[in-house]
Image (spheres, helix red, strand yellow):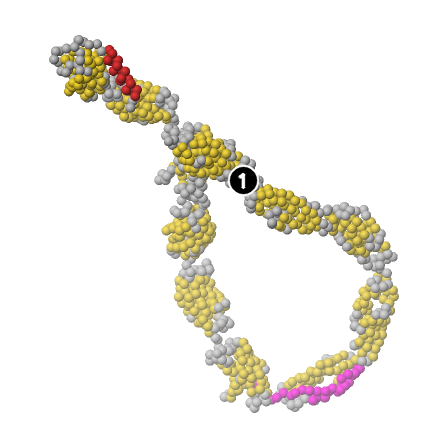
């Protein structure tokens, strides 16, 4: 209820009552209720007074010029103080009228003085305005205001409650007003449209017109893109005309807009915000900035969303395809494949788009590719996702010709001792092919291969020595594709016989022979071998095929006819070969034997030889071993004189009358000697001690025993001995030689001179830390009598075996000069003694990150001095290492004590240092409370781990849409207090940084729930 209106009405009624003056003494009118009515229809009016008549009429009179009285209808008498009636005010002219009550009985009347009854127009109603907005840089906007009850002379103003803008040059009808307004420089926001009629009544269209600032412009966003697995991309948007409480969104036709969160207007030309791109559609998105007045600016296609990674094909199956049709790719494997990806095969400028592309998973694509007529060779395969990212598998798919096909070969067989010309029929043959016969691991390559056409080839097959049986015929095109679909049969050739050994035999024995030739077969049975003369046959026994070229067997020649026999070989397959007059049968040969006397003696030696041969030799041929040979039918028992000493072998060759013979040789049968004459040489005959001498026997008479005396009591029975004279002096050397005829002796003198020394020395140690004591030992030869040592540091000694102390670190050369009466020798050993610094442990370390956060990898560097041989590291976490410069990882935070122990030849040392590994920087926080009625005071408590240097707190509403309320604490506290006055859900973000500026953030969405005040 409008209490102010009620009070005003009461006051007016009281005033009206007080002002009533009666027209006559009979009755008076004191007031009406209401005191006004609109000219749109009937109005009910209560009239109060004193002594009001029961029979009456009520008139509204004295209206505006040109108007008539208005008589009350439907009158009603309640009592002498209260009557009522209805007035039809429809269409009446607005204005004040006098209320007159007439007593219809006596004609008397009473006038209500001082309180006129007002006939009023309806207040105007504003229903719309066109246009509904304007920009505050426009100095003239034509407005059309529509509504009702507009009166001539009505005015139009725009008001925001503080300021007004007057409409100019209004043209008014009852339902429309046309005017213009100047909004240049006006405050942006909602303005009400007010229409005021001349009677002062006003109609208002609240917030009907919006004054806008110029639309913002967007010129750049940085970064200009992101991957759709990033849930918080921080961006800066630049442009102009940005207003506070603006919003930023990424917009793409057909996709749900991506609103920015945490939007902060840095200035009117720069905005900071965040986007959650998780699972968003890839491609170009418009960047739209909308000011609070609804004005927006767009950077078309300014932001590009990609998948997290480009596709990367790594393998294809099959990896080859024939250029005669469509090939199905069953497995194009890799990573990062996305639905809608395309596949293209390329070689140079040639391109073949794959069809039926199906992305089965991010790691597998299947497709088909039509390779008809495609160029032979390696092709690339490129996969392109619908975000434009692509990856290429280079040279992993090969387009090939079809493999050749074989349908026949003529002739289909050949012998393995000839070259067989053949014709091969088939399809897909290409120029310069290869033709092979293959069997197991064996291969026969065709020669003179001729390409006739794609269905015919000619070549020669060299079958010599090829294995028997079926061979596969292989045709290989130049691209290494081949087929093997037809068999070719290799057969045995006819055997050939080229010889027999021996080629003769006596008819009193069984002779073993070897038959030579070719193509002898051993399976399934051995061949048959025969000697034939006319119809007479001597079959071979124990026939054995040694190899295809040799047969062994035996012939029983006992009682067989003398003469030439033919040799026949029949292979198991029935093929025959022979050699005419290959074997001769003869009488038995003599069996030679002899004796001689004497067989030993001195030169000249006469020897009688006596024949002991059997089987009636006819001719004797003697070789006496000294170059003399005698032959003849009367040389059975010759006498021979040996004039030269030596040992001789004697041979007798006895032949029968058929020319068949045998021989016998008696080795070293006759020995002819002479008395020995001793001779020898010595090299050298003279020299310094120690003197090594080579003695060489040069005696005559072929001695068989030697006796050496070297003049110092030593002897030898070798023919050519070596001997070492250690001491100077004159030595008489004697050689005595012996043979069966006697002995002889020869002597020579050896002079061994005094020799100069050869300096040499050793040391008991050559390396160590200072001070280093070294014992030197002289091992010179040549019996030196004096010594001079220089130790490389100005120190010296004339002792034979000195002990010397090296007091300073360094590398020293040592020199020894040894002397005797025969001369001087010097031995210098450069860098012989190495004296190091004492062992002193030290090290440094380098962490893998500046903040030394876990997990922390640390590279340790040994800086120890001295000659260190071993290192032992204890990292303080139960782990050790013996490397010199190890790398160790600390997975957990803590303070660790590192100890390095080093060991050298002369001692050891240790050093200890500590390292602190801090917890990794992980943002976390809690709020207390998280819900309550507005105003709600909360405390945000940092619960992060790691070395936190700074904190940034952000409290914002509606982070998933357009955040309108943002509270930002750039230098936040560990316990941050803030009071939220507006109800709603609030998202809180904490960003922490360590001393190096490394950040981490934690966002809790809709974390604080502020309820309305109840």
Residue 249 appears at what percent x and percent y? Answer: 40, 35
From the viewer's side, name the closer residue of 572 and 788: 788
Q: Residue at x 69, y 89 (%)?
A: 612
Q: Which residue is mark 1?
A: 946
**Above/below status of 206 relative to 315:** above
Q: Up-down: is 651 above or below 364?
A: below
Q: Residue at x 69, y 84 (%)?
A: 652
Residue 53 horizontal/vertical position (percent)? 15, 14
Q: Which region shows up in magenta?
A: 584-612
Where on the picture, by quarter, is residue 452?
bottom left
- As drawn, which residue projects farthest toward the left? 105
Q: Nearer the viewer, residue 907 or 222?
A: 907
Give how far across and how far down residue 699 sits, in percent. 81, 74
Q: Residue at x 74, y 51 (%)?
A: 767
Q: Which image quarter holds the C terminus?
A: top left
Whether residue 841 is visible to the viewer of this picture, yes or no, is yes
- Residue 941: image x %, image y %? 49, 36
Q: Residue at x 43, y 69 (%)?
A: 487
Q: Is residue 421 visible?
A: no
* Badge 1: residue crowd in 10 Å (few <14, some 14–19, many ≥20): many
Magenta stretch containing residue 592, yes or no?
Answer: yes
Q: Quadrant of the N terminus?
A: top left
Which residue is more in the foreground, 866 or 952? 952
């Amino acid at each position: 209820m409008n209490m102010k209106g009620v009070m005003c009405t009461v006051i007016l009624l009281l005033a009206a009552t007080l002002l009533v003056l009666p027209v006559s003494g009979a009755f008076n009118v004191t007031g009406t209720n209401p005191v006004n009515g609109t000219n749109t229809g009937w109005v009910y009016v209560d009239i109060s007074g004193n002594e009001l008549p029961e029979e009456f009429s009520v008139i509204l009179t004295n209206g505006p010029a040109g108007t008539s009285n208005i008589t009350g209808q439907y009158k009603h008498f309640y009592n002498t103080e209260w009557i009522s009636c209805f007035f039809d005010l429809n269409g009446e002219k607005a204005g004040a009228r006098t209320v007159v009550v007439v007593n219809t009985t006596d004609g008397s009347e009473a006038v209500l003085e001082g309180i006129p009854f007002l006939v009023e127009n309806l207040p105007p109603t504003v229903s719309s305005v066109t246009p509904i907005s304007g920009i505050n840089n426009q100095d003239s906007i034509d407005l059309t205001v529509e509504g009702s009850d507009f009166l001539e002379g009505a005015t139009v103003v725009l008001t925001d409650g503080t300021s007004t803008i007057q409409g100019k040059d209004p043209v008014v009808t009852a339902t429309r007003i046309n005017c213009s307004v100047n909004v240049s420089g006006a405050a942006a926001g909602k303005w009400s449209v007010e229409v005021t009629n001349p009677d002062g009544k006003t109609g208002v269209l609240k917030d009907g017109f919006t004054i806008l600032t110029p639309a913002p412009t967007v010129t750049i966003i940085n970064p200009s893109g992101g991957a759709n697995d990033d849930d918080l991309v921080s961006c800066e948007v630049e442009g102009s005309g940005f207003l506070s409480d603006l919003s930023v969104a990424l917009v793409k036709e057909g996709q749900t807009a991506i609103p920015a969160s945490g939007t902060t207007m840095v200035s009117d030309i720069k905005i900071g915000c965040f986007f959650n791109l998780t699972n968003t559609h890839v491609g170009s998105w418009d960047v739209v900035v909308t000011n609070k007045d609804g004005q927006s600016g767009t950077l078309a296609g300014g932001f590009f969303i990609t998948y997290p990674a480009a596709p990367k094909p790594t393998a294809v199956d099959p990896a080859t395809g024939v250029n005669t049709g469509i090939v199905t790719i069953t497995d194009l494997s890799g990573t990062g494949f996305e639905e809608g990806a395309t596949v293209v095969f390329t070689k140079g400028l040639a391109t073949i788009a794959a069809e039926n592309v199906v992305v089965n998973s991010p790691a597998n694509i299947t497709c088909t590719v039509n390779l008809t007529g495609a160029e032979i060779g390696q092709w690339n395969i490129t996969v392109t996702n619908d975000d434009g990212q692509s990856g290429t598998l280079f040279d992993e798919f090969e387009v090939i010709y079809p493999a050749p096909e074989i349908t026949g070969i003529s002739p289909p067989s050949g012998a393995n001792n000839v070259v067989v010309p053949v014709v091969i029929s088939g399809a897909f043959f290409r120029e310069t092919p290869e033709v092979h016969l293959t069997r197991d691991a064996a291969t026969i390559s065709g020669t003179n291969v001729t390409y006739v056409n794609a269905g015919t080839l000619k070549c020669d097959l060299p079958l010599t020595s090829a294995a028997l049986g079926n061979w596969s015929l292989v045709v290989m095109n130049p691209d290494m594709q081949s087929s093997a679909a037809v068999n070719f049969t290799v057969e045995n050739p006819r055997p050939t016989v080229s010889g027999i050994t021996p080629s003769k035999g006596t008819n009193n024995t069984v002779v073993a022979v070897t038959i030579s030739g070719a193509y002898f077969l051993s399976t399934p049975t051995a061949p048959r071998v025969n000697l034939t003369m006319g119809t007479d046959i001597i079959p071979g026994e124990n026939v054995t095929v040694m190899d295809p070229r040799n047969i062994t067997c035996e012939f029983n020649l006992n009682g067989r006819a003398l003469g030439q026999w033919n040799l026949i070989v029949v292979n198991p397959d029935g093929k025959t070969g022979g050699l005419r007059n290959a074997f001769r049968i003869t009488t038995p040969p003599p069996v030679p034997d002899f004796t001689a006397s004497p067989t030993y003696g001195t030169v000249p030696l006469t020897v009688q030889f006596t024949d002991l041969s059997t089987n009636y030799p006819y001719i004797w041929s003697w070789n006496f071993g000294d170059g003399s040979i005698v032959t003849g039918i009367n040389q059975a028992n010759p006498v021979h004189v040996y004039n030269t000493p030596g040992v001789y072998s004697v041979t007798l060759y006895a032949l029968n009358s058929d020319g068949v013979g045998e021989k016998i040789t008696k080795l070293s049968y006759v020995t002819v000697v002479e008395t020995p004459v001793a001779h020898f040489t010595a090299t050298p005959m003279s020299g310094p001690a120690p003197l090594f001498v080579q003695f060489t026997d040069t005696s005559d008479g072929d001695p068989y025993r030697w006796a050496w005396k070297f003049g110092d009591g030593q002897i030898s029975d070798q023919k050519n001995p070596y001997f070492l004279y250690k001491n100077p002096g004159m030595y008489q050397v004697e050689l005595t030689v012996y043979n069966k005829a006697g002995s002889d002796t020869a002597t020579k003198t050896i002079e061994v001179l005094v020799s100069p020394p050869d300096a040499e020395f050793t040391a008991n140690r050559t390396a160590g830390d200072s001070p280093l004591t070294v014992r030197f030992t002289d091992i010179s030869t040549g019996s030196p009598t004096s010594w001079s040592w220089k130790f490389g540091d100005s120190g010296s000694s004339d002792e034979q075996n000195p002990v010397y102390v090296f007091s300073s670190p360094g590398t020293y050369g040592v020199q020894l000069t040894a002397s005797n009466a025969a001369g001087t020798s010097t031995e210098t050993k450069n860098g012989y003694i190495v004296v190091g610094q004492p062992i002193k442990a030290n090290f440094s370390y380098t962490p893998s990150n500046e903040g030394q956060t876990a997990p922390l990898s640390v590279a340790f560097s040994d800086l120890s001095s001295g000659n260190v041989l071993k290192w032992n590291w204890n990292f303080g976490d139960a782990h050790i290492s013996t490397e010199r410069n190890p790398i160790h990882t600390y997975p957990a935070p803590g303070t660790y004590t590192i100890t390095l122990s080093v060991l050298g030849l002369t001692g050891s040392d240790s050093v200890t240092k500590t390292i602190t590994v801090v917890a990794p920087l992980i943002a976390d926080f809690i709020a207390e409370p998280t819900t309550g009625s507005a105003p709600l005071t909360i405390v945000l408590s940092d619960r992060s781990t790691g070395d936190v240097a700074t904190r940034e707190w952000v409290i914002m509403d509606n982070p998933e849409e357009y955040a309108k309320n943002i509270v930002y604490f750039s230098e936040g506290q560990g316990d941050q207090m803030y009071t939220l006055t507006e109800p709603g859900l609030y998202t809180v973000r904490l960003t922490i940084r360590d001393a190096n500026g490394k950040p981490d953030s934690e966002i809790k969405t809709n974390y604080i729930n502020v309820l309305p005040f109840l």
